[in-house]
Structures are given as C-alpha cells and as structure tokens.
Amino acid sequence: MPPSYENYQILGFLDVLDRSPATANNENPAIVFLTTSDVRTISSRTITEANRRGIGVWHSIGCEIAPPSGNLQMGKAQLLNVGVYILPGRVPTGYGGPGNSGRI
C-alpha cells in the first residue's frame, strides 16, 4: 500500500495527520491500517513518508477466530516505525480495540 494507492488516498491521510492537533501540540499522530490477510506489508514508501512527517504507522490484520466459526477479529496492531516515537523520546501507547484477543 504505497502513498499513491487509490488515487493517493494514503498520501491524503498522511497530509491530514501532518496538519492535525496532535502535530500542532508536538505529539505524534498515527495511522492505523486495518487490512485483510492478503495485505501482509505496508509499503516502505508509505513508512518513509510517515517517518518524514513524524507519523506512527500501525498495522493490524483481520483473521478468523479458531476454531473456524465464521467470526472475525483483528490481530494485534504492530508499530512499523518505532523511530518516530523513540527519537523524540516518546513512548507509544497502545491503540486499544483492534488486537484484543476475543474482541472484534
């Protein structure tokens, strides 16, 4: 999912986050990608652009609850660019919801 995905929709999201109240207050905004299992990675170009803007990139993949019951849940959201938090001395907090075992 590069910044140009879907007519630059991801780049648009990064633009909005770059102008967000979090950025104005010297905090790190974040984008959380909730994807299907066929999207295994987020483009390095997207992560590079987010790094340049100080935006955290998180990724959570949907999965079926075992045993197969037809119910879905989101996997644990993984931080893909920890440096945007570490370099300015911030500790990222969890983004509750996606990834909590047994919850959709």
Image (tube, rainbow, N blue to C red):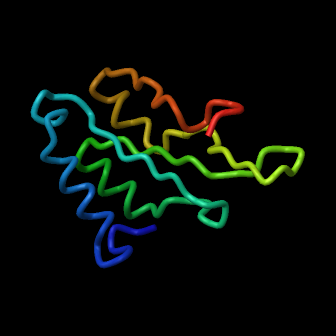
Looking at the picture, how far across and down is residue 48, in whole percent? 35, 56
| Relative horizontal placement of residue 11, taking residue 95 as reference (left or right) | left
Q: Residue furthest right?
A: 67
Q: Residue at x 42, y 23 (%)?
A: 93
Q: Nearer the viewer, residue 59 or 66?
A: 66
Residue 70 sits in quarter? bottom right
* Vertical placement of residue 25 versus 81, above or below: above
Left or right: residue 53 versus residue 10 is left
As displayed, is residue 2 above or below residue 46? below
Say how many tags the image has.
0
Locate residue 23, reporting x and y percent: 16, 36
Residue ID at (27%, 57%): 13
Q: Position of residue 30 (x, y in %)?
A: 34, 41
Residue 9 position by quadrant: bottom left
**Residue shown at 49% from the left, 59% from the top:** 42
Relative depth, front residue between 21 and 68 = 68
Furthest residue toward bottom: 7
Relative to 14, is 100 above or below?
A: above
Which image quarter holds the C terminus? Answer: top right
Residue 103 location (% of width, % of height): 64, 34
Q: In this rendering, would 50 be left or right of 18?
A: right
Please give the name of the residue rendered at 40% of the width and 26% of the height, measured from the top-left corner: 92
- Answer left or right for 98 relative to 56: right
